[in-house]
Amino acid sequence: MKSAIRLERKAFTLIELLVVIAIIAILAAILFPVFATAREKARQTACLSNLKQIGLGIMMYVQDYDSRYPRSEDGNYVQWYTTVYPYIKSGDQGNPGAYYGRGGVWHCPSYLADDFGEGQEYGVNLGICPLDWPSAWYGGSPQNPTLTVTESQIPSPSDTILAAEKGRNGCANGADNPCYSYPFFIPVEWEWTSVGVGMSNGEPTNDNANYAIAPNVECDTPYSGKDTAWECAMMPRYRHNGTSNMLFADGHAKSITKGSLKWFKNVYVAASYRSAVDNFGWFDPGSPY
């Protein structure tokens, strides 16, 4: 009589499978945020490289134009992206009168997937690079254009922001609320700080930038159900893990942690502040600046 041969089959039990799945889920929960952070760090680095190249282009422009920074936009609606383009030659040049700075070094990898043709992902400081076209609305004329700031008029170029990442507005209600943006960010004090800085012997007694990082200005569109605040298109954006890349008036660029900026130290330029406020039509007779 032949002896029965018993075949043993080895397999995972249900409990063992559940334990393995649980371990994989735990590891995924731990690692996915790490991967996302690493990916965003890579995008931040690429974006910072963009700003450094843009800064080099602006500095070359300044050398060619008697140490003056470019206007953010002139009377023919030509924006600073077109003005600086010959020194960089990157991106979609297009029609100079309608060029908003798109593609190439003008595009940050962390910006919105679709800019709706607007571009304008980086904006210059309106206090350093004023608009020219609104001057006609407030007493100016083509024969008396708004002048930009010179290097010598900025006391501390290494501390003063020249350009920053920003966003766009609109896009919520179709044709009635089209997407739009601006080629600049605004330097007016009441959009940066809730407490007047105050001056004592030329120094701030209370310097902060808490308004600039308030939730209503830290947003991207489309925004479900309602329009976004206009500040979305005129203020810095901290997309890179709570940091934003910024270009300073001396040409260097670096990442800035959200909440670390100071309005008086990093944004305000005494030589041009009043004209910057008047230039955009937000004259505040109560402001001492």
Image (tube, rainbow, N blue to C red):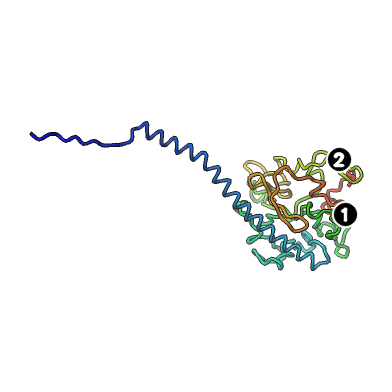
Give the labeled residue for mark 2: 205
Q: Under tag 2, what secondary structure?
A: loop
| Position of residue 187 in the picture relative to residue 174 (left or right) | right
User: Do we see residue 168 in this rendering?
Assistant: no
Q: Nearer the viewer, residue 125 or 205?
A: 205
Residue type at mark 1: give it. Answer: Ala
- How far across and how far down the image is residue 175, in percent? 65, 51
Label 2: how many residues lie within 10 Å, few (<14), some (14-19) or many (20+)? few
Q: Nearer the viewer, residue 134 or 11?
A: 11
Q: Nearer the viewer, mark 2 or mark 1?
A: 2
Give the labeled residue for mark 1: 271
Q: Are marks 2 and 1 in contact (CB under 8 Å)?
A: no
Q: Residue furthest left?
A: 1
The residue located at (66%, 57%) in the rendering is 119
| Position of residue 107 in the picture relative to residue 149 (left or right) | left
Quarter placement of the N terminus: top left
Label 1: how many residues lie within 10 Å, few (<14), some (14-19) or many (20+)? some
User: Do we see residue 135 in this rendering?
Assistant: yes
| Position of residue 262 in the picture relative to residue 20 (left or right) | right
Q: Quadrant of residue 73?
A: bottom right
Q: Nearer the viewer, residue 154 or 106?
A: 154
Tag 1 or tag 2, which sits nearer the N-term? 2
Residue type at mark 2: give it. Answer: Thr
The residue located at (56%, 46%) in the rendering is 36
- Residue 176, compared with residue 94, is above or below; it is above
Structural distance between the alpha carbons of marks 2 and 1? 20 Å
